[in-house]
Image (tube, rainbow, N blue to C red):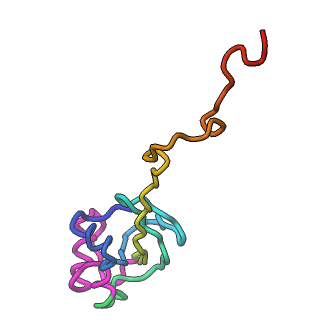
């Protein structure tokens, strides 16, 4: 899923956990994981609502001051002008940072035992 640059830090901080989309059909599924920078977005719910259903609290969770600001943002995204009865998808999600891969094996100066390095006997060790 794509998000405005202004929302990225707030999504990572858990301040934005909701988005509204004017899709023709759902483009996200519950349980879906979507790449987001160094982490991912985990979709918790996808419901169909109308623009009139956007509450002040939901607008805040989507990163806006009120429902009108949500509708203005949707219009800026090249969606048709949203009227109170316009069908929208309400997507609740959470941000999950991905763990930093451990590279201790590469940093350990102790040599690995021969078997773990694909050790082979020296030439001639098994006879001529």
Quadrant of the image occupied by residue 23? bottom left
Q: Is residue 1 above or below residue 121?
A: below
As for residue 64 lying within the magenta part, the answer is yes
112 to the left or right of 62: right
Seen at 33% across and 86% down, the residue is 58
Seen at 32% across and 83% down, the residue is 61
Q: Quadrant of the C terminus?
A: top right
Question: In this view, which residue lies farthest toward the bottom?
Answer: 56
Residue 74, horizontal then vertical, whole percent = 28, 70
Residue 53, horizontal then vertical, whole percent = 37, 88
Question: In this view, which residue lies farthest toward the right?
Answer: 127
Residue 109, horizontal then vertical, whole percent = 45, 43
Q: Is residue 66 above or below residue 101?
A: below
Seen at 34% across and 77% down, the residue is 14
Residue 59, horizontal then vertical, whole percent = 29, 84
88 to the left or right of 65: right
Judging depth in this view, the residue of 29 and 12 nearest the camera is: 12
Judging depth in this view, the residue of 96 and 33 nearest the camera is: 96
Q: Quadrant of the N terminus?
A: bottom left
Magenta span = 58-87
Seen at 21% across and 67% down, the residue is 6
122 to the left or right of 85: right
Judging depth in this view, the residue of 90 and 5 nearest the camera is: 5
């Amino acid at each position: 899923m794509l998000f405005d640059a202004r929302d990225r830090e707030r999504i990572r901080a858990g301040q934005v956990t909701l988005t509204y989309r004017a899709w023709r059909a759902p483009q996200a599924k519950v349980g879906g994981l979507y790449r987001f920078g160094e982490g991912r977005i985990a979709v918790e719910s996808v419901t169909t609502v109308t623009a009139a259903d956007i509450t002040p609290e939901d607008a805040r969770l989507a990163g806006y001051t009120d429902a009108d600001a949500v509708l203005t943002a949707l219009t800026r995204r090249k969606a048709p002008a949203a009227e109170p009865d316009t069908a929208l998808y309400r997507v609740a999600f959470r941000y999950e940072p991905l763990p930093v891969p451990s590279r201790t094996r590469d940093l350990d100066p102790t040599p690995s035992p021969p078997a773990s390095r694909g050790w082979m006997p020296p030439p001639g060790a098994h006879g001529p």
